[in-house]
Image (cartoon, grey):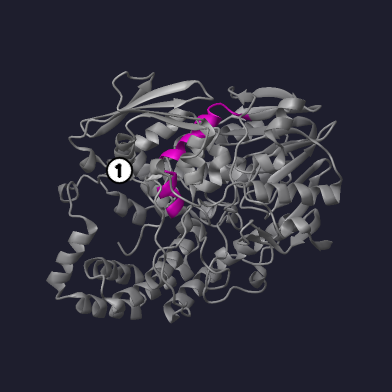
Amino acid sequence: MKQHTQPWARRFQRGAQAATGVAFLTLLLACGKPGGVGGAADEASPSTVQANAETAKGLALAKPQDFEDAQRGFIAKPTGKLLAADGSVLNDFDAYGFLAGPAPATANPSLWRHAQLNANVGLYKVMDGVYQLRGFDVANLTLIEGKSGWIVVDALTSRESAAAAMAFAEQHLGKKPVSALILTHAHVDHFGGALGVISQQEVAQRKVPVVAPAGFMEEATSENVMVGTGMGRRSIYQFGRDLPRSARGNLDTGLGKDVVYGAIGVLAPNWLIYQASQPMQLDGVDFVFHNVPNAECPAELTFSIPSKKLYDGAENLSHTMHNLLPIRGAKVRDALRWASYMDQALEQTKDTEVFIASHHWPIWGNARGQELITKHRDVYKYTHDQTVRLINAGYTPLEIAEMVKLPASLRDYFGARGYYGDLRHNVKAVYQFYMGFYDGNPANLNPLSPTESAKRYLELMGGADKAVAAAQAAYDKGDYRWAAELLNHAVLGDPSSASAKTLLARTYEQMGYASEAATWRNAYLTGAQELRQGPPAKGVSKAAAVDLLFQTPTERFLEAMAASLDGPAAAGKDLKINLVLTDQKESYVLWLENAVLHFKRGTAADAHATLLLTKPLFVKMIAGTAGVKDTLLSDELQVKGSKIDLVRFFGLIDKAAGVFPVVTR
């Protein structure tokens, strides 16, 4: 067993850098606001210590099988840091060394165990001809040996992490070309590092198969462009990006260790999987692909390699209950369909001996693999059926979330516990899937905004000090949910109350320390951090996703632009702009009507201005990486007509910085 610090672990070049200036056309790309400083974490309270002790008492935490599986086939572990070009740390391979030993009082012992399992970072041999690189990013990169090279399964989140994983594999397994790339689904932590695995030019020159499920490119690009800013901000909460890696901070994400927020790209697939079962040979290896859309991801596949008796469950299968609606936000997922795919998987894997997935460690042995699939099938089916039963009995989502409890046969199975998803959250997702956000009570049909409601509650209670005093009494009893509710009113209704913010931060910490779901822990602790320090100085920038944006259809950008129009400011405005992408031979006319931004292909003779530019420059403007020199003085840009009207038009487009407050608004 070897450990090495590699040159690639010390520095990698980012694909996109921060903007150096702002052109007249990019007024919509305003900079973010700096965050505050200060704050420190508290110790676990007696109530939290007791709650975590009760959790430990009811679980076989010392059960060794998972630890044996997570360490089986170990070859080598990386050390050191993966850095961006600006010197910032993208991944610290030694950051989670504190996880050795028993759980401290500041961590749910079940989550601590899971975090220890995910801390097995490195290169592993799964079986002859199959290897996995774990911990280079939140997901796994899998290598399958073909006749001429590596068949790579999933490409991690960023170019930097994927390139590091491939370089590490080359050092220990020898140099081989990439002979195929399989992208199991359209979530960025599985395709964003594609250009760190193989270049677009090499794919074209060597005709390398890039396999993905039907609908992959549409799903991969649409989510990240339309609501990427808001989802990115909330992902900081979900993944605990800015938390310290410590027993009082970030332990895990539930799916793996850190998400690497580096340069994001994509490779368009040249082979699509449409069928429920679709045989295909890649580099001499016979695969059977299964198209499984609209469960964990709108576009997803799983596959089998019959000759190896191996099954890859992609992200439909992990060593955790998954989420039906991530707390960062996403399209709500279909629990019933997910359960049906697990039923199909039981038949597809009746002769399988090795089970791998896009996250976590493998399972060996057919009986244990079938058990994992069965438990996941029944967790999602039970969650769905019991929620629907209670919907039809007239209960609301908050009530149902308190009522649904898994039976012991599912609850006690470590591989389906709520480390990433959470049963209470999933129940609400099932409710939303069928019934929407409204719970049927007319009082909730048109409620006051949280801030306005908070002001009135404080007035009724006699001010923030009274609310804080009541919350302190609840805190002292360990009644943290009620304390948080009271203090949320105090913080929103009286932003000047330092005592409310301080106590709410302490309350969130206790709730985080007791949370079994890593996502909930990270959200609570990030909320505490924001209460003490303010919002982050840096959001999740589009600048890192330039390589992905280059592959995005122009219509997606224009849809997102329309959704960013400042409607009140646009009321009564009559502006029409032609947009011509000269290198793509694409033309669009954009116009305002009833404070709505519309677009269609073609140009208008009566446009106030015509903007001619290349798509790469357009993408750089959208991403915020094109400065004054890149635009005004560029040969790639030309303006015909009124520059003033062009400025007026783009001045109506909001550019969210992605650093908005979450708990202090």
> Which element type, helix, strand or loop, lies under badge 1?
helix
Residue lying furthest front in this view?
A: 633
Vertical relation: 540 (above or below) 252: above
Residue 88, picture quadrant: bottom right
- What's the amino acid at mark 1? Ile
Q: Which residues are magenta?
A: 212-233
- Residue 231 lies in the magenta stretch: yes
Question: Residue sitting at 36 percent across and 22 percent down?
Answer: 600
Question: Residue sitting at 65 percent across and 23 percent down?
Answer: 278
Tag count: 1
Point out residue 42 in the picture as x, y percentages from the top left corner: 46, 79
Point out residue 451 in the picture as x, y percentages from the top left corner: 22, 61
Q: Is residue 36 left or right of residue 161?
A: left
Q: Quadrant of the N terminus?
A: bottom right
- The residue to which callout 1 is attached is 391
Q: Which one is in front, 5 or 519? A: 5
Vertical relation: 14 (above or below) 206: below
Q: In this orientation, does residue 405 appear?
A: no
Point out residue 66 in the picture as x, y percentages from the top left corner: 68, 57
Point out residue 31 in the picture as x, y percentages from the top left corner: 41, 54
Q: Which one is in front, 659 or 101? A: 659
Q: Is residue 167 left or right of residue 316?
A: right
Residue 577, picture quadrant: top left
Question: Residue sitting at 40 percent across and 67 percent down?
Answer: 530
Check disc 1: other Cα within 10 Å, few if <14, some if 14-19, many if 20+: some
